[in-house]
Image: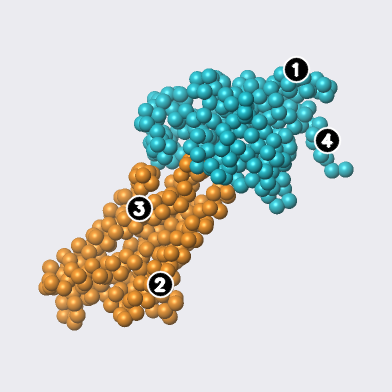
Chain colours: A orange, B cyan
Amino acid sequence: MTIGIELKKLKSTGFFTSFFVGGLVAALVPIANTGFRTELFTSLEGSPLSILLNANLQMVTMLNQILIICGACLMYHTEYADHAIRRMLTLPLKGESLFFGKSLLLALGFFFLLVLESASYAFCTMHWFRMTDGFLPELLKNMGFATLLTLPTLLFMLLVASACQSMWVSLGIGVIFMSMGTVLPEGPFPLTLVPFVTPFKTLADAGSGWAAYAAASGAELLLLALAACMFIRIRRYSL
Amino acid sequence: MKPIIETHELTKTYGNFTAVYRLNLHIRKGTVYGFLGPNGAGKSTTMKMFLGLVRPTVGTFTIDGMAYPRDRMEILRRTGSLIEEPSFYGNLTGRENLDLIRRILGLKPSAVDDALELTGLTRFGDRPAKKYSLGMKQRLGLAGALIGRPPLLILDEPTNGLDPVGIHEIRTLIRSLPEKIGCTVLVSSHLLPEIELMADDVGILNRGHLLFEGSMEELRETAAMKGLPSDNLEETFLALVDEDNRKRRPM
């Protein structure tokens, strides 16, 4: 029921349009990039997917993060703009279900982006490289890894958006963290675990350390979920 | 008859400031209870405590025999409310806003039309709420409180932003609710003549202290006994508050 309610709240907010258009733009990046630099990419050593990910991940991840930031801000803007959240809190509804309902929707939005981007990588491989039997398992492993590494960012951004009554403040925080994310991926291991930084890691980049990244993301998810539960209980008395 | 709302020594403090002090309210079932007090008297804080939006520092209260915080969810299920200003999703229509509340409360779809009709919003139900006038937003807030015809309504300044015709309509509606849908209404207002016209009982709050609780008739008798004006509620209220302020003024 909560998902249905949260979905309805997003009507006429621009959420669906921005994810659809943004997803298409992100999916076009590998196609355009490979189309313009075909010779360079096809002459490189390695699997087609790793070549495509290395060439496009930075831009695609940044677009995904912009959409996550905008999505989270829009979701909570509708709650705060006309004090709707106060009405919600006077209804027999747990504050946690409101937050996690939004998290699930935003995660579904992100999953939609991944599907479009995966289709784009598959198209590029078929059109400019040679499709092999190993492509699909490699793609699934990479997208699964990307999902796991992006979920803490998504939860963190929703937590920020839920804490800031002004959408511009949460948007600003999101943009600052995203800019930081473009600088830190090459830093020491602990710094690469910060939300907005981890999604820039590919499975190939992580190498043998992939399990450490996966475990750290899982732990971050748990910590952020706990922080959200605590914050929601405190916020109830401060609106 | 056991009151539907009963508070026992209910107190709320913020640091050194006491918003509500040892409040003992008794609100009879099936009545309209007018909650009066100057700005900052603690009316909204008290109402927010009933809705679980403010945590009491000391004291307890029961609503229809249910205790807070143990039965918070059930209290909220059976209480319609409008606190401070109307709260709604501006991107949704009035009807969609009410439908969200209906779904959370698990009511039948017809409850939306019923609430729109009760508040005179039927014609505007499909218009986005952000395009409503202030009066229509207030009515939407009221419709959200009335949806499902709950046994208890908590309304904080429900006539704010309404024109004289709107005020008259809402007053008539509130006055008729105990008979029409069998509910109890706790209503706060700074418009004293409004309360005089719609309330069965009144509670007068000043600086967090309850100065008087009882029927209008009892208020007049109390005021006359104290030598205060008793001809109309406004004069009685002002005299009571003034007397209390003088008592509490630091020496």
Chain letter of the residue beneath label 3 in the structure image: A
Residue drawn at x 64%, y 34% is: B6
Chain letter of the residue beneath label 4 in the structure image: B
Mark 2 and mark 1 on one chain: no
User: In which quarter of the view is residue B4 placed?
Assistant: top right
Marker disc for residue B246: 4
**Is residue B158 shown above or below A149?**
above
Q: What percent of the width, then of the height, locates residue B211? A: 75, 32
Q: What percent of the width, then of the height, locates residue A180? A: 43, 70
In the picture of the structure, the residue carrying the numbered disc 1 is B231
- Residue type highlighted by circle 1: Asp
Chain letter of the residue beneath label 2 in the structure image: A
Mark 4 and mark 2 on one chain: no
Q: How crowded is mark 4: few (under 14 residues within 10 Å), some or many (20 or more)?
A: few
Marker disc for residue A105: 3
In the picture of the structure, the residue carrying the numbered disc 2 is A216
